[in-house]
Amino acid sequence: QLQLVESGGGLVQPGGSLRLSCAASGFSVDNYRIGWFRQAPGKEREGVSCISRDGSRTVYADSVKGRFTISRDNAKNTVYLQMNNLKPEDTAAYYCAASPTPNVVYTTLSSRDFASWGRGTQITVSS
């Protein structure tokens, strides 16, 4: 059974850092593009970042460019989101998502392009 489990969330002060992990089981991530999304209370789900199957392409929302970095370790079947210089507006539930694709370099921030989702991990940025 395909499963995605996020971890690494928590409470952090503005300017701090966190690293989220998305551990996959039941499938091999190297056949999937992986994305990170977030949803704050009362707001729509937002695409944060995506990494291509082969890891050569990444895309970021404008709001996180220069602060967040997505990476993947196919040997560990895990994708990471390193988040630096966190801001209160980054507070949200963060979800990873996966979708199989024959295209090794395609990336997207559209949630409609992802078939499988984790349950999310909460990040709160507050002093």
Image (tube, rainbow, N blue to C red):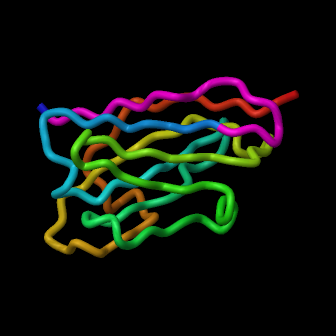
Relative to 87, say whether 47 is above or below.
Answer: below
Lateral position of residue 80 relative to residue 125, left or right: left
Q: Which residues are magenta?
A: 2-17
Residue 14 sits inside the magenta stretch: yes
Residue drawn at 13 percent across, 34 percent down: 26
Classify residue 69 by image quadrant.
bottom right
Lateral position of residue 70 relative to residue 74, left or right: right
Relative to 71, say whether 87 is above or below.
Answer: above
Classify residue 113 by image quadrant.
bottom left
Residue 101 sits inside the magenta stretch: no
Lateral position of residue 72 relative to residue 13, left or right: left
Farthest front residue in view? 75
Rendering coords of residue 20 (x, y %): 50, 37
Rendering coords of residue 87 (x, y %): 79, 45
Relative to 31, say whether 14 is above or below.
Answer: above
Rendering coords of residue 32 (x, y %): 22, 57
Rendering coords of residue 66 (x, y %): 67, 64
Residue drawn at 55 percent across, 65 percent down: 60
> Where is the N terminus found, in terms of image quarters?
top left
Residue drawn at 88 percent across, 28 percent down: 127
The total of numbered circles placed on residues is 0
Classify residue 34 by image quadrant.
bottom left
- Closer-to-camera residue (45/4): 4
Residue drawn at 15 percent across, 46 percent down: 28
Farthest right residue in view? 127
